[in-house]
Image (cartoon, rainbow, N blue to C red):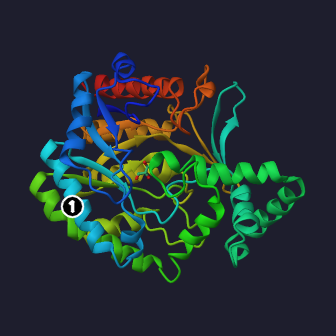
Amino acid sequence: MEKTWRWFGPKDPITLDMLRQIGVEGIVTALHHIPNGEVWSYHEVMKMKTFIEDHGLRWSVVESLPVSESIKYGGADRDELIEKYKVSLTNLGKAGVKTICYNFMPVLDWARTDLTYPNPDGTSNLYFSRAEFAYFDIHILNRKGAEKDYDADTLARVEELGKQMDEEGRRRLVDNIIVKTQGFVNGNISEDDLQPVEKFRELLALYDGIDAAQLRANMAYFLSAIMPVCDEYDINMCVHPDDPPLQILGLPRIVTCDADIQAFLDAVPNPHNGLTFCAGSLSAGAHNDVQQLARKYASRTHFVHARICRVMPGGDFKESTHLDPRLIDVIATFERERPGVPMRVDHAPLMLGDEKMGYNAGYSFHGRMLALGEVSGIMAAVNALNK
Ligand code: DNO
């Protein structure tokens, strides 16, 4: 696989010169300064591409060219937004940037409750507590009927949590679930929003009456509309699985399991319609066998996210080591079957001073460097043993 790295643009404290020194071959980035729904001009695309190439690297993957909320729920302006999306794709295609990651998750791009969960060795990781998430849903968002979505064990944990929860704890949950994890990925809520919870409620309301079947139809509509541009420029679209791959907040979620993946691939049977194989997101659902999914969907995978989660009793999950045997197996599958496919390490621990650097949640330097070293070692071993 091609060793790539998610880099957040010229303002990222991790520089391209640093990345060259640690074995990175290709860059994964986006034009983060352009608001969602606006066209990425050829000029802006080329400016970024040239900047990267001037540092001896290449722009391998766009993560993400965001799909506007209105395209997802099927708003009145969706056709206009799809036309703009096609212009951005055309400009990327003309510039030769041909792997595009996106997601079709309503409202929330990814969800964690704790961004600095301590490990025994002094590092920290991202963590998802089902009870804390349920507490946010039931007692902060006050979503109507939310209790019905949780089992008795989780509700009992929520009650316990309620006894200790103070204003600071509630503020921290809001910050982790809908602010800190969203702004930097061009999500709906940014650190400047003064009333994040109110804004979030308004966003959820956009999906009233939209079920999974409707969301699937909207995804197929979007993909069918853009496929001619992808065919013309040989652009590979790769949808990111829902993170976590579970039903949350009463929203429809349609990229959570084997059947979902098969469904969107079948809905638009074009090789340019593919998957970002995020082993981490898929493994956060106990229903998924990531190793088997990797084997089944390798040929439709255009981008790999190397990380893996450990699900605990009760549904909490934590990012696990990149040397987890399940991830070794997944990496071996892609290394054998898709040797040139871009791969980036994802969501590594905070360690050795990372915590003081203000990195985006999950995107530390030392933690990811260690993870890249580990994954590179796995790849080298697979290749050596294959010979
Ligand atoms: C989180 C990322 C996601 C991903 C988008 C793709 O760390 O994996 O934000 O980039 O969902 O559109």
Residue ID for mark 1: 86
Q: Amino acid at mark 1?
A: Lys
Quadrant of the image containing the C terminus: top left
Q: In percent of the image, x 48 and y 79: which residue is there?
A: 211
| Above or below for 5 versus 91 | above
| Above or below for 88 versus 23 | below
- Label 1 sits on a secondary structure element that is helix
Q: Nearer the viewer, residue 330 or 270?
A: 270
Outermost residue, top direction? Answer: 21
Quadrant of the image containing the N terminus: top left
Residue 230 location, x and y as percent? 17, 57
Q: Is residue 355 left or right of residue 168?
A: left
Outermost residue, right direction? Answer: 163
Q: Nearer the viewer, residue 323 or 306?
A: 306
Q: Is residue 248 left or right of residue 226?
A: right
Residue 229 location, x and y as percent? 15, 60
Residue 72 location, x and y as percent? 39, 70
Q: In percent of the image, x 35 and y 28: which residue is there?
A: 379
Q: Is residue 316 visible?
A: no
Q: Is mark 1 within 8 Å of ligand 1?
A: no
Residue 319 location, x and y as percent? 58, 41
Q: Is residue 184 visible?
A: yes
Outermost residue, left direction? Answer: 232
Q: In percent of the image, x 70 and y 69: which residue is there?
A: 150
- Pointer 1 local density, CA inside 10 Å: few below 14, some 14–19, many at least 20: many
Q: In percent of the image, x 27 and y 22: which residue is there?
A: 55
| Above or below for 43 versus 354 | below
| Above or below for 312 versus 9 | below
Q: Nearer the viewer, residue 334 or 174?
A: 174
Residue 132 appears in which quarter of the rendering? Answer: bottom right
